[in-house]
Amino acid sequence: LAVLPPWRRASAATSPYDLIVVGAGTAGMPLAIMAAESGSRVLVIEKSPVAGGTLDRAAGQTSAAGSIVQARKGISDTPQDHYSDIMRITQHAADPALTRLWTAHAAETVNWLISLGLDYPSTMPVVGGHEPYLIPRAQTPLGGGGTLWRTLEPLFAKSVASQKVRVQYNSRAVALLQDSKGAVVGVVVSGENGKRQDVYGRKVVLTSGGCMANQRMFEELHGSPLYYQSGYPFNEGDGLLLGLAAGGFLRGGDRYCPLLAMAMEDDRIPGFPVGQLDVHADRRPPWEIWVNARGERFVPEDSPSPHQKERALGWQPGHRMWAIHDHLAMEVFPSPIRTWSKEKYIDAFSSNPMFVKADTLQELSIRSGLHPAGLATSIQSYNESLARGTPDRLGRAHRPKPISKPPYYAIRLQGYTLMSFAGLAVDHDLRVIRQDGIPIPNLYAAGEVIGATATGGSGYCNGSMITPALTFGRLLGRRLGKIDV
Ligand SMILES: Cc1cc2nc3c(=O)[nH]c(=O)nc-3n(C[C@H](O)[C@H](O)[C@H](O)COP(=O)(O)OP(=O)(O)OC[C@H]3O[C@@H](n4cnc5c(N)ncnc54)[C@H](O)[C@@H]3O)c2cc1C
């Protein structure tokens, strides 16, 4: 990437395209579709052999206030309420201007998807395992992100077939061309055969996703290893580097927060997940305790707030926690790993090195990598306050049984994420900006390349990635095309 000197000068005089879109994914597809509808000459550069990016593998959660889905259920909601809810959940860590922008237009996006044939069976305060909104406004189509992809990709393909959009697959944007004043005038593309080509356009939009396929970059930007590589394999952070080389800057990595408790195949990084602890107290009131590597409890395990628990895990060494219980719990309770049968759970203690069973707490600690004295103290204190009927040290209310009957069990669980929190700084018009706040002429960005922090803060709100990616794509497509909004 950026083999060319970043300050390479070029002439914009002969721009054959109105718009060059770098990445045909969640944000790039609607962008190209909208711009083409307005009569613009659009070129899409796509590194992989197909359009769609991360959409196909995503859960497909979106959220919007004032959508048709809510109207069908008689739910009254406003973009202002949606915005305030996100700010409440993220403790004001999301970018206010960008959050206002996507929440203001999210219903248009959801209604557009419905007009294209997508069906949402329901809308809820929360889907999946995130912090609930105060008003039902989160929804997933049957079939998840794959259904979103199957809705949008044919429309994108139609724009290509009708020659409104030109797309170059297996082609990677490797540098931005700038004129003598620093305005972006085109892109250097490395094509299928490795041949480089300069293409010129009036505007360039980076929709190339985050850096979830680039372990080294992820770790540098977030101060945490990429424990689980779940993202689209072509998203190596190219757009972040292109924007940086053009004069932009990155923000948001310091707000990284892990999701809770993935059971992994072994201790390799990135690792392969085998199951997830059911951490939702309303669904499964916890009967185990959670400790960090020092053997210390760090959060009330039965807290109803996923965000509180995620943030607490974010402060623990290696974003790692162990769920500990005794044999009595093993006899009485079902598997705590979601979707696992009890038999599969019992079997894991003889087949997976992350699941450890031992006759004493000392042996359990040593074999599972926990501080023995720390774990012994935590269990003693938990059992004593339960026996005395005094409040739990961390405020946990649900304490069904002491942890005292050997053998003992420990599951090592990993915090992880699905998206890059760090991204290119943009202003409220999605223009890539320099550190002094001045926009780089002709350069825009949308989707995960602007970082998850921009639209979802330091945590996970339902739909706070896909909805803004689609919405910003639509908005930019219309604004940079010839239709006024
Ligand atoms: C497993 C999983 C589940 C998720 N579930 C949800 C969810 O339910 N709700 C939600 O809101 N968010 C979810 N997310 C996050 C969300 O899916 C992504 O943040 C979003 O889809 C990213 O959209 P994008 O347009 O930025 O990137 P993408 O959709 O990934 O598109 C980027 C495109 O750019 C291309 N590209 C990359 N580099 C270059 C280059 N140099 N030149 C040309 N092309 C390039 C890529 O090949 C790709 O096609 C999930 C993420 C994962 C991994």
Image: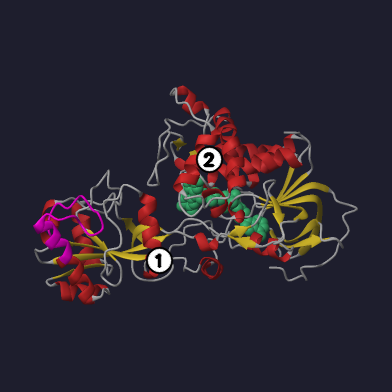
Structure colour scheme: secondary structure
Q: Which dot, 1 or 2, sits closer to the camera?
A: 2
- The verdict on label 1 being within 8 Å of ligand 1 is no
Residue at 81% x, 57% y: name it: 183
Residue 429 in picture, x, y percent from top left? 70, 46
Residue at 26% x, 73% y: name it: 370
Q: Where is residue 343, by image quadrant?
A: bottom left
> Mark 2 sits on what residue?
83
Residue 366 in picture, x, y percent from top left? 22, 77
Residue flagged by tag 1: what amino acid is it? Gly
Q: Secondary structure at mark 1?
A: loop
Magenta stretch holds residue 393 = yes
User: Measured along the vertical axis of the image, is residue 159 above or below residue 262?
Assistant: above
Farthest residue in the front direction? 390
SS assignment for the magenta stretch, majority: loop
Q: Dividing the image into 4 quarters, which one contains the N terminus?
A: bottom right
Q: Where is residue 468, by image quadrant?
A: top right
User: Measured along the vertical axis of the image, is residue 197 above or below residue 148?
Assistant: below
**Depth order, front residue of 223/110:** 223
**Mark sitting on residue 194:** none
Residue 385 in picture, x, y percent from top left? 14, 59
> Mark 1 sits on what residue?
271
Residue flagged by tag 2: what amino acid is it? Tyr
Binning the other alpha carbons within 10 Å of mark 2 as few (below 14), some (14 to 19) or many (20 upward) gives many
**Depth order, front residue of 377/201:** 377
Q: Which residues are magenta?
A: 381-402
Picture mark count? 2
Residue at 18% x, 50% y: name it: 334
